[in-house]
Amino acid sequence: MRPIANTRSAAGLPTGRLGVWWVLASEIVIFGGILAAYIMQRIGHLDWGEQQAATNVWIGGFNTFVLLTSSLSAVLAHQAAEKEQDGKKAAKLLGLTILGGGIFLCVKAFEWTTEIGHGMTIQSHPFWSFYYTAAGIHASHVIAGMILMGFVARDAAKGLELHRVELVGIYWHFVDIVWIFLFPLLYIAK
Amino acid sequence: MADHDSPHYVKHYVRIWAILVVLLVVSIFGPFVGIEAVTLITAFGVALVKAYLVAKNFMHLNVQPRFVGYLLSTCLVFMLLFFSGTSPDVMKHEGTHWVKPLVVVKGPLEHHAEHSSGQGDHGESPHEEGGGGH
């Protein structure tokens, strides 16, 4: 029996994809709220630049590169599933995307360990409060995406539920877009 | 990645990825020019272009029904409306008929530390404190 997310269409969209867009609409409010709050505070307190100067643009840049590359493998997985109906290839490409998420998190762990070791903790300054909160919520979304992708890849490798490859990809690209804005806010505009 | 055996779509997506990487390099090296306007453009202008490229080419937002775009932009606009409504409270420390209390300007921890050490200056305008600390 096919799941309702694939067989039923609502408002001209498969129900599963419609659900993902609804999730992302709510995510816009979550991440948009954090970013807007940070921007307002940052403009109101130019002295935060002294704290922000300690962030490492090369590490942030490398992580941006990793996420952009993982988005490429995610969209190629979607195309492999949709255009070629090749579940094994899609699963391999999703595996590469998960690897990208893993590298991103390892780099983040190294970066945070270094910063916390130098006394830059979530309580040391409002800038670091925003920094750890925004990047932490983003990292939790990366972890959630990796777990979801693991389940989707497992099924896709068996040729099952290939439409989900696109759905998890859309989510992953959104997480990528959030980082695209977090990177200049936290690492560049000092 | 885009070798001879690759399907035709691979080349398109690899090209988009390459553009994104070039834009990333631009945003990293923008601040080295040393001009604030250039930094802002290369940081946030480039971020907008990158987000557009990902949304259009990777998420395929452009081929979704129109209401999906309306749904996302409605959430964005309402969120921005809410924040623009509260922004004067956050970004300004005094107005025509009001002065923000020091405990709000400085934060409860710093304010309490100063107050308990006897150095608190309750009556002082936050504006005279060099922009209000953090």
Image: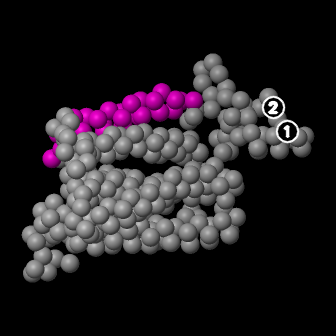
Image location (x, y in percent) of residue A105: 49, 67
Q: Residue A33 versus residue A4: which sits nearer the camera?
A: A4
Q: How many marks?
A: 2
Q: Is residue B69 left or right of residue A66?
A: left
Give the amino acid type for the residue marked by disc 1 in the picture: His
- In this view, A28 is above or below B29: above
Q: Which residue is pictured at 31% across the width and 46% down the height?
A: A20
Label 1 marks a residue whose chain is B
Asked which secondary structure carries label 2, the reply is: loop
Image location (x, y in percent) of residue A104: 45, 68
- In this view, A102 is above or below B62: below
Do the numbered discs 1 and 2 sit on residues whose CB atoms are within 8 Å? Answer: yes
Give the amino acid type for the residue marked by disc 2 in the picture: His
Asked which secondary structure carries label 1, the reply is: helix
Q: CA distance from mark 1 to mark 2?
A: 8 Å
- Which label belongs to residue B122? 2
Q: Which residue is pictured at 25% across the width and 34% down the height?
A: B70
Residue furthest to the front: A1
Determine which residue is flagged by label 1.
Answer: B115
Q: Which residue is pictured at 19% across the width and 45% down the height?
A: A7
* Label 1 crowd bin: few (<14), some (14–19), many (20+), radius 10 Å: few
Q: Is residue A149 left or right of residue A79?
A: right
Q: Is residue A112 left or right of residue B57?
A: right
Q: Residue A18 versus residue A36: which sits nearer the camera?
A: A18
Q: Is residue A30 magenta?
A: no
Position of the N terminus of chain B, as image quadrant, is: bottom left
